[in-house]
Image: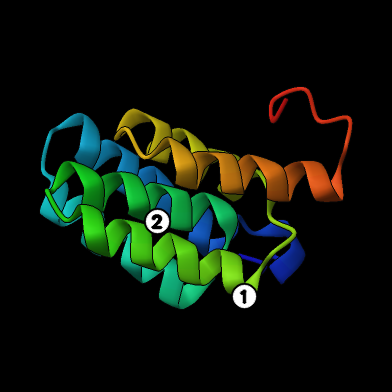
């Protein structure tokens, strides 16, 4: 059987996202955290870090969830999807002042972003 080029294989991080999503559906949040964390270590990306945040949040580790996502955004300030996700998370937890800061950061880069308005 012929090996496929790396560009033809699914991204490793995406596989961990699927696995993490499956564990969340089964309400096994500890296993979901491990899957997303492996994805983050293997191939860090926006979808992986958002999944990790969600799994940590569901596992009751809100502070760690926020800290990991905040660090990602410090290192990747242009990640609009992660920034909007964090703003939504802050809103869900009544931290509107922090949510506004995230929305303002999105609007600074993209003044016409309707989701941030």
Q: Is 113 drawn above or below residue 48 in the view shown?
A: above
State which quarter of the image contains the C terminus.
top right
- Where residue 110 appears, as percent x and y from the top left, is 86, 42
Q: In terms of image quadrants, where is residue 89? A: top left
Identify the element where label 1 is drawn: helix
- Taking the image as shown, residue 23 lies to the left or right of residue 95, namely left
- Taking the image as shown, residue 106 lies to the left or right of residue 56, namely right
Q: What kind of colouring is applied to the model shown?
A: rainbow
Q: Is 68 drawn above or below residue 114 in the view shown?
A: below
State which quarter of the image contains the N terminus.
bottom right
- Taking the image as shown, residue 62 lies to the left or right of residue 51, namely left
In the picture of the structure, the residue carrying the numbered disc 1 is 75
In the picture of the structure, the residue carrying the numbered disc 2 is 16
Report the front residue among 41 and 68: 68
Q: Is 7 drawn above or below residue 80 in the view shown?
A: below
- Where residue 97 appears, as percent x and y from the top left, is 47, 42
């Amino acid at each position: 059987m012929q090996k496929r080029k790396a560009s033809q294989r699914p991204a490793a991080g995406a596989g961990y996202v699927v696995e993490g999503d499956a564990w969340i559906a089964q309400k096994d949040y500890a296993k979901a955290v491990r899957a997303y964390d492996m994805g983050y270590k293997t191939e860090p990306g926006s979808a992986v870090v958002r999944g990790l945040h969600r799994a940590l949040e569901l596992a009751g580790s809100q502070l760690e969830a926020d800290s990991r996502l905040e660090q990602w955004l410090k290192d990747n300030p242009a990640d609009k999807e992660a920034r909007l996700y964090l703003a939504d998370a802050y809103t869900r937890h009544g931290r509107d002042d922090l949510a506004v800061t995230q929305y303002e950061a999105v609007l600074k880069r993209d003044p016409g972003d309707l989701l941030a308005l």
